[in-house]
Image (spheres, helix red, strand yellow):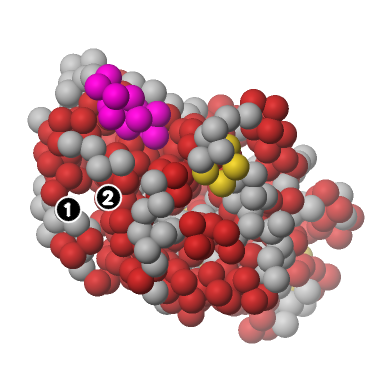
Amino acid sequence: MISEKLSKYIYETNYRDLPQSVITLGKMCFLDWLGCTIAASNSVTGHIFLDLIRELGGNKDATIIPYGDKTSVLNAALVNGALSHFLELDDIHKKAMYHPGVPVIPAALAISEREKLSGKELITAIIMGYETGIRIGIAINPSHFWFWHTTGTAGTFAAAAASGKALKLTKEQLVHALGNAGTQASGLWEFIEDGAMTKPLHPGKAAQNGLLASLLAEKGFTGPSRIIEGVRGFGLATSKESNFESIVSNLGSIYHMNTMGFKMHVGCRHTNSPVDGTLELVNKYNLTPRDISKVTIRTYKLATDLVGKTNPKNITEAKFSMIYCVATAIKFRQCGIDEFTEQNLNDSEMKSLLNRINLVIDDSLQEKFPQGYASIVEIETTKKEKYIKETDYAKGDPENPVDWNDIENKFKKLAGTVLEQNKTEEIISKVKSIENISDITQIILLSRKK
């Protein structure tokens, strides 16, 4: 049984069993998640969640980052999960079609704070969550992704695995936790049709529901033992093709975390490759919006379905508009958090630029998907010049990787919008040597903006 084999692996794996490369990646993912969460704290979405949790109250066991409010572990997992996904800058696994950090880390961190766990214990829990969710995401995609947001679905299993490890559940309890995580797994793409705020709710609920499943299992509440592969289980209900055995193949010897990707630009991951290509062209040839008569972006079908918005009406739609993201790269020479504002959405030059950018499905790029999120950008100028850039892998993909310095610089830029420099530097230092921290609350206290 899949859940039984996964649970055995999660239960038996300790920090000393983990390869150093995977531990380093775990640290990078944690620091990246912290930066995304801290920088999103001024968002309208963040304050909606915060206001609700302040009204609901709860045992003061875990911290909402970076506000500093203490609440129940379930509430903290919900808000931290939602907040960390808001900017669309969080980590991603391409083949799993899934953002692992945003459901996993909030669930593991909430329990780690309540139980005052060590850095080693937190990183181990995070890695167990990542590995579980990524393996399930790979097994059910790409067909799952058409209706289901994998971050909300596979993410619920992942949060249960991470929090279950942090809670030190037994093998049997972990089976029950995964079972009741799977029956709660959800997250539908319909929000994209009208730019609703829903997307960050998916990882927030995944973190909260996965943690709830683990807490119930700890109390003796049972769950289905074949929730993944069963005849009425998650896999058959949500995917046209499933490779269940791949979920438990080579557990402990192959770590799918090694193929993690990190975002260097705001926006759905499918926008990042053409943004990279556009930046290379506009910087190389010193192009401005006035120099450009037409831009053609060649991409694959899912990208046109998911990020094909031509005239985004709000910030959510802008993050899911390849055309808008490319326009920011042309106008501002970057695609960061400062470019996604109502002012820019309504800017006359931006609107004119959006009308000169077109998306085209390219069969050669379709063949590379989902192993690659490739693109071809063609820019035609008012002087009848034509520049072309093909980008197979965006910066941050495992094939075009970032290193610790890149993640550190990204963290400084994001967290620096909220925290003082001395705090950001200290957080970086502590995460880098997290194996030496006896109580993870040391980092949580530094992450508070109060």
Residue matched to label 1:
13
**Residue kind at label 1, given as amino acid type:** Thr
* Residue at (35, 59) in percent of width and height: 118
Could you tell me which quadrant the N terminus lies in? Answer: top left
Circle count: 2
**Residue kind at label 2, given as amino acid type:** Met
* Residue at (46, 72) in percent of width and height: 430
Q: Is residue 212 magenta?
A: yes
323 or 190, which is in the foreground? 190
Which secondary structure lies at badge 1?
loop
Q: Is residue 155 above or below residue 432?
A: above
179 displayed left or right of 351: left
Residue matched to label 2:
128
Name, please, the residue furthest toward the right: 348
Q: Where are the magenta residues, as a range?
A: 210-221
302 or 228, which is in the foreground? 228
Say whether disc 2 or disc 1 marks the residue closer to the N-terminus. 1
Marks 2,1: beta carbons within 8 A: yes
135 or 194, which is in the foreground? 135
Q: Is residue 332 above or below residue 271?
A: below
Q: Is residue 298 magenta?
A: no
Residue 277 lies in quadrant: bottom right
Q: Is residue 123 above or below residue 69?
A: below
Viewer can see residue 429? yes
Q: Residue 320: give x, y in percent of width and height.
A: 61, 46
Name, please, the residue furthest toward the top: 232
Q: State the CA–CA distance, disc 2 to disc 1.
A: 8 Å
* Residue at (25, 22) in percent of width and height: 220
